[in-house]
């Protein structure tokens, strides 16, 4: 598939990797969630600014700056020696959307973190995962001082399909983030079973 | 774009990583997946004799046990783009093997149940 080419002889020695994305608007708690539940590590990527972002970004005075550094949230949970869960926070700003397709490739599913004070910020993530058919759950991060909403009203506001789980969480608390992850993986299993009732393939 | 535009002072931190890549900003062909698995194809004792860049030697030491591209970039503290170019060069020289990410788990409910069990123990 990739012209880089792969050597497949080692695949039996390689750990199975499960990729889960953590998305949501700026300030929704993505970094907090990834660090609550996993061993978080620095990961940088330097990208050329794409044409659309050159139009959007104010580059006055930095006209020669054509690459930009993006720090990504990156965490891993080692399940067993041969099974690792990777968490990637998807960069929230619009100019980094070009990275999403790569992050989404082969992802098991996604968590869309929503802040009820700025629910509209999670629309783009919801749209994206619906469009590319990646299982996702919406986790409402219960910030202190924010009015509590019932999951059902969040579901209505986001116009979600009936099956999409909506859960409340506290991104600062490990058990809460763990429960969100469990909800997502169980949801992915349900989708897998319903798409493949005879267990073939 | 004229070359001198790459050399202004704003470019500071960019110069060093991309010196490792001979100034290239894209690997040959398409790039490896974030979770592609890199393994060393070199005997551990041979590494010191090979006159490699320190970063290349570090890649070889890190991936004696197969390691993902993302993990390597994080360990080396280099941008992903730089690491991918290094890896494509190293693969061309036969120093490493790069395997597809093993995504068997995506379609195997048993693997996913193992993941759920492990997450519950967190």
Image: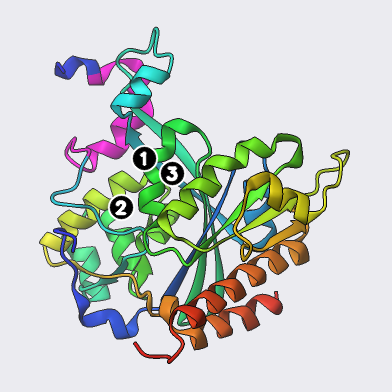
The residue wearing badge 1 is A98
Report how far apart the C-alphas of labels 2 and 1 lie in the structure. 28 Å
- Of circles 2 and 3, the one toward us is 3
Mark 2–mark 3 Cα distance, whole angstroms, equals 16 Å
Which residue is at the front of the view, B7 or A120? Answer: A120
**Residue B54 at x, y percent in the picture:** 29, 52
Chain letter of disc 3? A
Residue that numbered label 2 is attached to: B55
Tell me: B14 left or right of B112: left
Mark 1: which secondary structure? helix
- Do labels 2 and 3 touch, CB within 8 Å? no
Query: Helix, strand or loop at disc 3?
Result: strand
What residue span does the magenta drawing correspond to?
A: B6-25
Percent coordinates x, y for residue B34 in the rendering? 36, 58
Q: Which mark is residue B109?
A: none
Precedes in sequence: disc 1 or disc 3: 3
The residue depicted at 25 percent of the width and 19 percent of the height is: B7
Quadrant showing the C terminus of chain B: bottom right
Q: Residue at x 30, y 45 (%)?
A: B81
Q: How is the image coloured?
A: rainbow
Cα–Cα gap, marks 1 and 3:
15 Å
- Pointer 3 residue: A44
Q: Residues within 10 Å of mark 1 (few under 14, many from 20)?
A: some
> Considering depth in this image, is B113 or A13 the residue closer to the camera?
B113
Q: Residues within 10 Å of mark 2 (few under 14, many from 20)?
A: some
């Amino acid at each position: 598939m990739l012209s880089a080419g792969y050597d497949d002889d080692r695949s039996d020695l390689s750990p199975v990797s499960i990729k889960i994305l953590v998305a949501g608007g700026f300030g929704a708690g993505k970094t907090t969630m990834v660090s609550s539940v996993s061993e978080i590590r620095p990961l940088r990527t330097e990208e050329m600014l794409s044409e659309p972002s050159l139009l959007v970004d104010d580059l006055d005075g930095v006209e020669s700056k054509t690459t930009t550094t993006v720090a990504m949230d990156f965490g891993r949970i080692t399940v067993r020696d041969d099974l690792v869960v990777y968490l990637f926070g998807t960069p929230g700003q619009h100019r980094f959307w070009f990275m999403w397709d790569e992050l989404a490739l082969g992802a098991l599913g996604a968590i869309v973190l929503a802040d009820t004070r700025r629910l509209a910020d999670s629309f783009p993530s919801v749209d994206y995962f619906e469009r590319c058919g990646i299982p996702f759950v919406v986790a409402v991060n219960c910030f202190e001082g924010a009015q509590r909403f019932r999951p059902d009203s969040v579901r209505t506001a986001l116009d979600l399909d009936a099956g999409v789980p909506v859960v409340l969480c506290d991104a600062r608390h490990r058990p809460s983030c763990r429960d969100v992850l469990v909800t997502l993986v169980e949801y992915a299993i349900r989708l897998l079973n319903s798409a493949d009732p005879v267990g073939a393939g | 774009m004229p070359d001198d535009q790459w050399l202004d002072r704003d470019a500071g931190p960019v110069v060093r990583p991309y010196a490792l890549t001979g100034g290239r900003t894209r690997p040959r062909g398409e790039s490896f997946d974030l979770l592609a698995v890199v393994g060393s194809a070199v005997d551990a004792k041979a590494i010191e004799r090979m006159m490699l860049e320190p970063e290349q030697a570090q890649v070889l030491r890190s991936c004696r046990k197969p390691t993902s591209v993302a993990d390597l970039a994080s360990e080396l503290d280099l941008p992903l783009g730089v690491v991918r170019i290094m890896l494509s060069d190293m693969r061309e020289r036969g120093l490493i093997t790069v395997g597809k990410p093993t995504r068997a788990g995506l379609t195997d409910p048993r693997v996913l149940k193992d993941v759920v069990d492990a997450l519950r123990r967190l």
